[in-house]
Image (cartoon, rainbow, N blue to C red):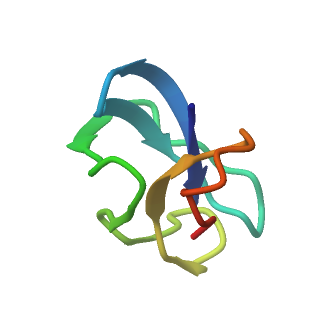
Amino acid sequence: MAIEVTGGIVVNERGTVVTYRQKCEECGYVYDYNKTTIVPAYSTRSARNFTCPECANYQEVSVRHYYGGSDPKRKPN
């Protein structure tokens, strides 16, 4: 199982605790400090959205468990 972040990059993950940095999908600007959140297993969590200081793009941030296995009982999000 892996963590996928929209609007950020993963710095560290330990189980369901994820440390990430906010990243603008428009211009690529990455904040120089980390944020931490808890992601429920097999679910998506909306994280702290932000406005990019470089290009003023409003960036939504979501963090989710990415499941790439073939468990027949598990449906992808």
Residue positioned 73% across, 42% down in the render: 68
Quarter placement of the N terminus: top right
Residue 30: x and y, percent?
59, 42
Q: Is residue 55 above or below residue 70?
A: below
Q: Could you tell me if residue 34 is visible in this image?
A: no
68 or 14, nearer to the observer: 68
Name, please, the residue furthest toward the front.
72
Q: Residue 71 appears at what percent x and percent y?
A: 64, 45
Residues 63 and 7: in front is 63
Left or right of residue 55, residue 36 in this image: left
Can residue 25 be spotted in the picture?
yes
Residue 49 at x, y = what percent?
37, 71
Up/down of 21 relative to 63, above or below = above
Identify whether 23 is placed above or below 9: below
Residue drawn at (46%, 38%) of the image: 21
Which residue is drawn at the image coordinates 63% and 60% (left, top)?
24
